[in-house]
Amino acid sequence: MSNCLKIITSRQNPQIKYIKKLLKNPKERRANGEFVAEGIHLVQEALNASATIEAIVFTETAYLHNSEISSIIDSLTGTKIKLIKTTSICYESFTVLKSPEEIAVIIKSKQIGLRQIDKPKRMIILDDIQDSGNAGTMVRTAAAAGFDCVTLCGQFSDITHPQFLRATMGASFKIPCLETSKDDMLEFLKKSK
């Protein structure tokens, strides 16, 4: 294990409460500039994409009984990534999944704006997509089809929502996803001609 290992056994621990807030409250995610992605696949995708990882949370049970999880944790020995080992009861207090794999990653949000991207040749604009799962599926499709970026505007614009992240299956770590207003999007498109 890493020398950055922290063991938490209480559901009342401030770190456990913080993770719960990040998972369940978009205002907390925006205010703190961090979000949480749950599950082996999303943790691996975040690591592979060199996302700015604040910590990885896992349970001792998952570490002992799941070789993929123990492999991920063991591979981080000696890195600067903080590891938080907790109990299944603590994990259940914050998870949004019905059957969690008991591993999650806390990631620093990337604030990418329209002005920060080069003129994309192939961009998908998602306007007023109200279901975060549908939006995530479209991001996954855009990444598979080789698009340069995805922009979400209007009603839905929370690229850190847990359901959105699960639906992308990690594609949101591979393709830039931006949140913007409709007015800014229209202005960007006018200038891009």
Image (spheres, rainbow, N blue to C red):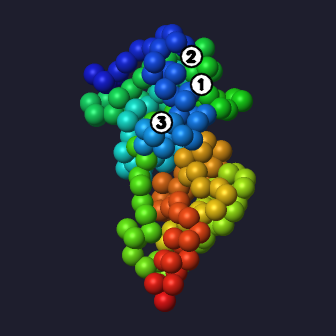
Say whether disc 2 or disc 3 marks the residue closer to the N-terminus: 2
Seen in the picture, residue 67 relative to 133 is either above or below; the reply is: above
Along the line of sight, the residue nearer the viewer: 66 or 144: 144
Q: Nearer the viewer, mark 1 or mark 3?
A: 1
What number is the disc on residue 94?
Answer: 1
What number is the disc on residue 42?
Answer: none
Q: Which residue is mark 2?
A: 90
Along the line of sight, the residue nearer the viewer: 132 or 53: 132
Please state if 80 lies on the left or on the right of 32 as rendered. Answer: left
Disc 1 and disc 2 in contact, CB within 8 angstroms: yes
Mark 3: amino acid: Val
How far separated are the C-alphas under marks 2 and 3? 15 Å
Say whether disc 1 or disc 3 marks the residue closer to the N-terminus: 1
Q: Dot 1: what SS?
A: helix
Mark 1: amino acid: Phe
| Residue 116, horizontal then vertical, whole percent | 37, 68
How far separated are the C-alphas under marks 1 and 3? 13 Å
> Is residue 146 among what the camera can see?
no
Seen in the picture, residue 56 relative to 113 is either above or below; the reply is: above
| Residue 1, horizontal then vertical, whole percent | 34, 22
How far separated are the C-alphas under marks 1 and 2? 7 Å
Q: Which residue is mark 3?
A: 105
Q: Residue furthest bottom?
A: 193
Q: Dot 3: what SS?
A: strand
| Residue 13, horizontal then vertical, whole percent | 47, 14
Q: Residue at x 27, y 30 (%)?
A: 78
Q: Residue at x 41, y 15 (%)?
A: 7
Q: Residue at x 58, y 36 (%)?
A: 25
